[in-house]
Amino acid sequence: MAAFDDFGLVGALVTQNDLIETGRAVVQKEAEALSLLANSLDERFEEAISLILATEGRVIVTGMGKSGHIGRKVSATLAATGTASFFLHSSEAAHGDLGMVMPGDTLLILSNSGFTRELRPLIGYARRFAIPIIAIVSRLDSPLAKAASIVLPLPRTPEACPARIAPTTSTSMTLALGDALAIAAMSKRGVTKTELAMWHPGGEIGSRLAPIEEIIELDDPLPLVGMDTPMRDIVFEMTSGGKGVTAVVDGDGALVGVITDGDLRRAFDQVLIARACDIMTPAPITVPRGTPVEEVLALMNAHKVTVLFVTEVDDPTRPIGIAHIHDLTP
């Protein structure tokens, strides 16, 4: 069996039976490190947020090796949450890419040790042009920590790999701290869901945050019947809409009820005599144009319905489209 001590996996080899134990030990070790990190945050974190918010240019994230990979993600998260940011490869910086860094920017430099040789040109350039540096680093005696305007120290805790060398625990902490900076800055800015939707127009996030009228078809004719429409005509109108529902409107075209295919089945014994007003559900649930898709889905789930009508914002009795749950879920 594999053995573990306070620093992680001791044995270099594990058997098939040890794999789950190995995985759990790594996750546990990283979880413990994240807990240490959370408890270590102090006024320096607040200072870093203030600097990010005061940055007139971009927050430029950089790092080498695994820190560089983490840096790309941190930069993407910053940009996705309202902080203008891009990633700069530390090695390429010394070969012309330093021109991307301008006065008014802030450098966010990631390095576990802080002694990474490729960071030296960046540090010198930042000093020359008074560009502030936020450093995420574990060694406070390192050149990076000494040059930084603000140091966010990583707790000195061993890596979770057997040899305690491969970046594991340190990269998890760096990623979490980068996420914390991004989300805290977003919260301080008061970023709204509307703004997030603009920055995430694609994929599931974009679909959930998009206004309902961007998902449904507003040009399709709506299935509409009057209060006195007989059931036979209701069936024809509902079939033409293809959504299993029809709106019931009064003489002025105002929405007064809805009829679903379930309502028709329940009233089948009245097929020869029933009118729309006899079998409709009055005061139907609607949403105005501009409602985010995720709110429409929440409303459907809360009321246990699969379809509802979308109305104009200034006239909740004027239907303009149909939202069906099948159109709103991937």
Image (cartoon, rainbow, N blue to C red):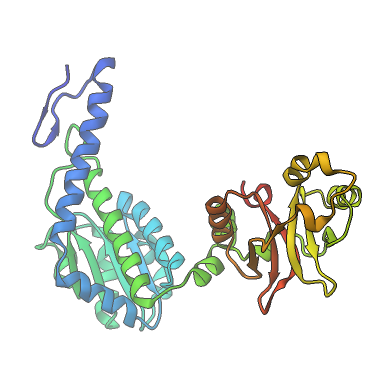
Q: Is residue 48 visible?
A: yes
Q: Where is residue 304 in the image (x, y as percent from the top left)?
A: 58, 48
* Observer-nearest of 291 and 237: 237
41 left or right of 168?
A: left
Determine whether, in the image, residue 131 is placed left or right of residue 232. Answer: left
Point 85% across, 54% down: residue? 275
Residue occupying the point 74% across, 66% down:
256
| Residue 148 at least partly seen | no
| Quarter occupied by residue 295 | bottom right
Q: In which quarter of the image is the N terminus?
A: top left
Vertical arrangement, residue 160 with respect to residue 328, above or below: above
Vertical position of residue 195 compared to residue 6: above or below: below
Q: Relative to 269, is 41 on the left or the right?
A: left
Camera-side residue of 62 and 177? 177
Q: Report whether 146 appears left or right of 286.
A: left
Count of picture labels? 0
Pick the residue in front: 131 or 58.
58
- Residue 180 lies, in percent from the top left, at 29, 62
Q: Is 178 rendered above or below residue 269? A: below
Residue 130 quadrant: bottom left
Q: Position of residue 22 (x, y in %)?
A: 23, 27
Q: Nearer the viewer, residue 324 or 263?
A: 263
Name the residue located 63 percent from the left edge and 65 percent from the top edge. 287
Q: Where is residue 81 in the image (x, y as percent from the top left)?
A: 43, 67
